[in-house]
Image (spheres, grey):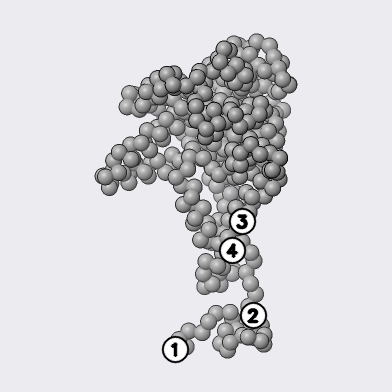
């Protein structure tokens, strides 16, 4: 339990008691799609060597110098309350080396964890001013979760490739190849954000604070005007509403993003907090870091595939329902195709009109217009 004493160089914040997770592996909280990729990469021989060699090509040193020279480094003398939160988060997740943290002057609420050799955490003044102590604790835990999982490596590469894509945009094939990699990395990183949200909950151990923080990031510091339950209802409406056209627009909207939409993150975190997996972690039963080398790539990919399949099967999104119907051989699929995009709304299919109903033109008893020449 976090008790406010000195432990392994980490000074915890004594504001309230929180459970600690000695030796916890990031596999305990990672989203299945994120975990499967990380397990596979950790198994690759020479993976670390390759990326350390790449560090000479990436602007990591430049970024470190930039934050050192033009931001405020968190310490016991500067932003001491953030320093306490950072050390506490590292203590709870048993991260041996506390990463440097910087506060950067930027009114946009944001935080990130980047770096190849050693991760660094950056939070903006907009975020520090927006969140209260418990909400900020969840964010700091989120970034420490990124560091523990090793996400900072891929975030740095994503930043580099996105910048490179802009520079080679005049080369059609070169830009296409890089953007394909960027798109795949973004999908991976969106899942890693869900993983880090879970890490933030493990650190803060206050679901309502995590919900409030996400809601504030979406709507600003107006808690008296907002409601968590109504905010979560937006996520449900977003997923279930519209027809196939809206499903396509959702995909196009999310493709350029490195983060899932805020309402979606809130809904996913609440769903995970209600699972047996979360309760087992809180009870002290979780994968250990010293067992990471024994993790099976095949099992991880199987869990990832099962997760995606489960999302498709339970999703209320019209496109996902169509995919599920095709897989299940839905009997009304042909009729829905004939009726076009409007036939794939989240509402139930309309019954055929009564041929005796007033206003039904001849030849349209099945609900379809007559064809010329028929």
Of pointers 3 and 1, the one earlier in the residue sequence: 3
Circles 3 and 1 in contact, beta carbons < 8 Å: no
Residue, disc 4: 345
Circles 3 and 2 in contact, beta carbons < 8 Å: no
Is disc 3 placed on a helix, strand or loop? helix
Is disc 4 placed on a helix, strand or loop? loop
Q: Residues within 10 Å of mark 3 (few under 14, many from 20)?
A: many
The alpha-carbon separation of the residues under discs 3 and 1 comes to 40 Å
Residue 131 shows in the view: yes
Of pointers 1 and 4, the one earlier in the residue sequence: 4
Residue, disc 1: 373
The alpha-carbon separation of the residues under discs 1 and 2 comes to 23 Å
Query: Residue at 45% of width from left, 32% of height from top?
Result: 155
In depth, the one of 323 and 171 nearer the eye is 171
Query: Residue at 38% of width from left, 38% of height from top?
Result: 162
Residue, disc 3: 240
Q: Residues within 10 Å of mark 2 (few under 14, many from 20)?
A: few
């Amino acid at each position: 339990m976090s008790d406010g004493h000195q432990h392994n160089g980490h000074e915890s914040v004594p504001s309230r008691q929180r459970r600690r997770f000695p030796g916890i592996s990031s596999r305990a909280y990672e989203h299945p799609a994120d975990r499967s990729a990380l397990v596979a990469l950790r198994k690759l021989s020479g993976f670390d060597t390759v990326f350390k060699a790449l560090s000479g090509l990436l602007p990591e040193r430049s970024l470190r110098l930039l934050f050192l020279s033009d931001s405020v480094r968190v310490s016991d003398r500067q932003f001491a309350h953030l320093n306490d939160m950072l050390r506490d988060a590292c203590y709870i997740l048993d991260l041996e080396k506390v990463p440097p943290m910087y506060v950067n002057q930027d009114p946009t609420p944001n935080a990130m964890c980047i770096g190849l050799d050693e991760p660094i955490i950056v939070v903006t003044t907009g975020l520090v001013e927006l969140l209260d102590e418990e909400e900020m604790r969840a964010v700091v835990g989120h970034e420490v979760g990124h560091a523990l999982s090793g996400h900072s490596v891929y975030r740095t590469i994503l930043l580099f490739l996105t910048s490179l894509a802009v520079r080679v945009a005049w080369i059609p094939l070169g830009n296409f190849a890089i953007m394909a990699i960027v798109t795949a990395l973004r999908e991976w990183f969106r899942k890693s954000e869900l993983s880090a949200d879970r890490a933030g909950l493990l650190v803060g151990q206050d679901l309502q604070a995590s919900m409030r923080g996400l809601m504030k990031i979406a709507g600003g510091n107006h808690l008296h005007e907002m409601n968590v339950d109504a905010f979560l209802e937006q996520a449900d409406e977003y997923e279930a509403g519209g027809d196939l056209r809206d499903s396509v627009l959702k995909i196009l909207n999310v493709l350029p993003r490195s983060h899932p939409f805020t309402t979606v993150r809130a809904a996913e975190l609440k769903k995970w907090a209600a699972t047996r997996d979360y309760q087992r972690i809180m009870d002290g039963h979780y994968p250990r870091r010293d067992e990471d080398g024994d993790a099976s790539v095949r099992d991880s990919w199987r869990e990832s595939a099962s997760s995606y399949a489960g999302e498709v099967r339970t999703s209320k999104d019209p496109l996902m329902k169509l995919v599920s119907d095709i897989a299940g051989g839905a009997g009304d699929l042909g009729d829905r195709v004939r009726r076009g995009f409007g036939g794939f709304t989240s509402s139930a299919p309309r019954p055929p009109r009564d041929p005796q109903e007033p206003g039904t033109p001849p030849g349209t008893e099945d609900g379809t217009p007559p064809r010329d020449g028929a």
